[in-house]
Image (tube, grey):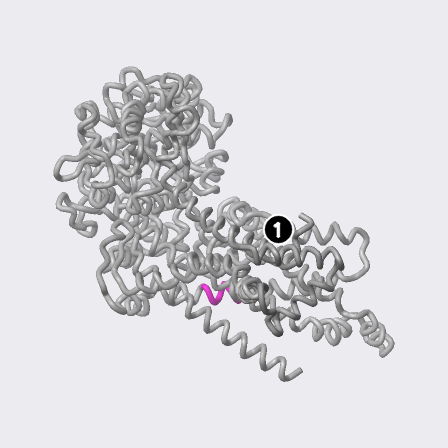
Amino acid sequence: MRTSTRGSRRLVALAAAAALTTGLLAGCADDGDDGSSNSDGGTSGGGKTTLTVGTFGVFGYKQAGLYDEYMKQNPDITIKENVTTRTDVYWPKTLTRLQAGSGTDDLQAIEIGNIAEAVQTQADKFVDLGKEVDKSQWLDWKTAQATTKDGKTIGLGTDIGPMAVCYRKDLFKAAGLETDRAKLAEQWKGDWSKYVDVGKDYMKKAPKGTKFVDSASSVYNAALGGEPERYYDKDANVIWDKSSGVKTAWDASMEVATSDMSAKLKQFDKPWDQAFANAKFATVACPAWMIGYIQEKSGDAGKGKWDIAAAPTAANWGGAFVGVPTAGKHQKEAIALAKWLTAPEQQAKVFAKQASFPSIPAAYPSLKPQAATTAFFSNAPITQIFSDSAKTIPTQIFGVKDQPIGTAITDIGILQVEQKGKSPAQGWDAATKEIKDVLGQ
Amino acid sequence: MTSSKQALARSASSADAAPGDQPGAARRAQGRGTPPRGPDSWRSRLYRWDMKASPYAFIAPFFIFFGAFGLIPLLYTAWYSLHNVQLSNLDQQTWVGLDNYRNLISSDFFWTALKNTFTIGVISTVPQLIMALGIAHLLNYKLRGSTVWRVVMLTPYATSVAAATLVFVLLYSWDGGMINWLLDFVGVDPVNWRESTWGSQFAVSSIVIWRWTGYNALIYLAAMQAIPADLYESAALDGAGRWQQFRHVTIPMLRPTILFTVVVSTIGATQLFGEPLLFGGASGSKGGSEHQYQTLGLYMYDQGWIIGNLGKASAIAWTMFLILLIVAAVNLLITRRLRKSQ
């Protein structure tokens, strides 16, 4: 370009700047598109449909190889999982995307603590999956949690968290306690305060440096999981301060918090992980999903030393659902995938890999934990214990702010008593103040 | 069209005739002064327009982005803060006026968070800058392998907040953590670093100090190396020792740099968020069971994204903004004072 001069070069530069600016803006607009292309941008690559699955934590589908299996069976489908590690990050993000009507994944996992909020405020953003499946396959209370008042089911049940107690046989023996799982279960059957009594016995001859239980809040959560009444009544009114379930669970946890039987750890913290490896506590309230966790964190050193006994009450702690947002562009394919992922055979496969317990009873006879897991837990009849619990879990009602209320009680109220030596009354007041803040009262 | 072609031809010939800056400069002068007449007028108008407009085009991307991602959210947040907005129901907003702010002022949690932000800010910023100054002074000596030391200083800054905090959580864990183990070694009772007020604030500050000291030290070091060596020589001739040189030569020469780091660190401390959040573990946004290390940033996050009360969270955001403005104004005043006194 010998003809170009400074003047015209300037023009070129100006044009370039303008192009750059619009390019950037276009890039920005592209980004906006990108959000929705999570759901619509799949059709590239030879007519293949890409489905995205939004999950949190370790959901187990990928780990159990379900995506690969499905893609093999359906060559025109590609599945991509978008994992968010922290639940408290995952849910707000999902909520905003649902309401914006863009950026949602084709399948969206919903944690049990959020399902009531989804049912009560986001029902119109989800496909009614109740029409697509035979709902009677699932445990009644599980489907009920994902169903609106007018009968729309926004999510299919994945796993549940039936309760047991995992305990270290070696520590129990050293403390001179009963080690047989059936007899132990008999000792504390029916009431978590009987479990606390076993803890008192344990502390009399506890091996040095060990405690009976990891934390008072784990006892609270386990006990509350067996109570029909939680924080809300069936008309969605907050009743946490008069709920009989909360009172029972609170009292049991206070017995633990005010004694010396708790290792005073906070669940899912690093030090808690470490305490598994160092055998710092003898028991932990054990919903089915906890099994994999204990196995992983205790490592080989714990092999054969852990055992599982039935919990004082049949209870549920945790679990999840998968829903199909109406904002997705491949709803038909997404519904098919959701049905397949939650079918009994697939739930059984997830159990075999992750010990996430199925919400469809038809899957129970075929459940096979991995040989390593069985050996780790002293050949305990894992499926038997959890199936028995699962079938008798009461129907619990969840509410919009279930999760923050629960956090206020465990991480404020109970923690103050357990770690700061406050009285139960002071702990309750602190939790009350926090919950009032949560509810905007 | 023809005129512009002619113009191109003409300018091409002029460029051929005299390559280099001269013709361009001449034309620029002409462009700014008397506009050329005749067939050139369209070109010159375009040219003048170019002179005026293109700087704006060049800076436009920043302002467009600032508008889209800074200003509009800022104003929208102000609008939100006057409403009751729930995260689960963004479309339904009810006007509540200043209720969110009134609510905030009467809330103990807010005042705790404000106080915590201040105390954690002070106990992390002050030691941090003093240590950075000392380290920079040491690094300024002739050292063997000085580059290595400087790189090492910067490593904490290069590690992610998450990784650093996780390690500190383990160090500070009250049962079996290394720090309590060391305390036990010298006969001190273990401290519950997460639940005690001062313990937790100290622990959070130590993460901040660990991450930022090296960064500030390098800034100081850069400034120190710009101090002329003859100042030190003459000071040495006057019989000043190392310490006196540091006090009477280094510190005064570094004053603008120190002010800069103070301002930046203060802003950083006001926005402290990641370290306490991760330090708190599973329910970190509460900042401990008595909110003992909940900063304003955490309080806003807890209200908005955990509890889902976006209206109140927006009110906190605006309050924080106002506090930052006040901090900036105080900084400005102090800077002016110092300049005048110099």
Q: Amino acid at mark 1?
A: Pro
Residue beneath the point at 39% across and 31% down: A42
Is B103 on the left-hand or right-hand side of A60?
left
**Circle 1 sits on which residue?**
B156
Q: Where, by quadrant of the figure, is residue B255 drawn?
A: bottom right
Q: Is residue A336 above or below residue B114?
A: above
Q: Nearer the viewer, residue A244 or B82?
A: B82
Q: Nearer the viewer, residue A290 or B11?
A: B11
- The quadrant the N terminus of chain B occupies is bottom right
Q: Which residues are magenta?
A: B117-124
Chain under numbered label 1 = B
Residue beneath the point at 66% across and 58% down: B10
Q: Where, by quadrant of the figure, is residue A61 drawn?
A: top left
Q: Is residue A213 visible?
A: yes
Q: Is residue B121 magenta?
A: yes
Query: Where residue A379 sits: x, y (%)?
Result: 38, 18
Q: Is residue A372 above or below residue B10?
A: above
Count neighbours of disc 1 (C-alpha within 10 A) and say few if under 14, some if 14 to 19, many if 20 or more: many
Q: Nearer the viewer, residue B43 or B112?
A: B43
**Magenta region's main secondary structure?**
helix
Q: Is residue B125 visible?
A: no
Residue beneath the point at 62% across and 65% down: B129
Q: Nearer the viewer, residue B175 or A140?
A: A140
- The quadrant the C terminus of chain B occupies is bottom right
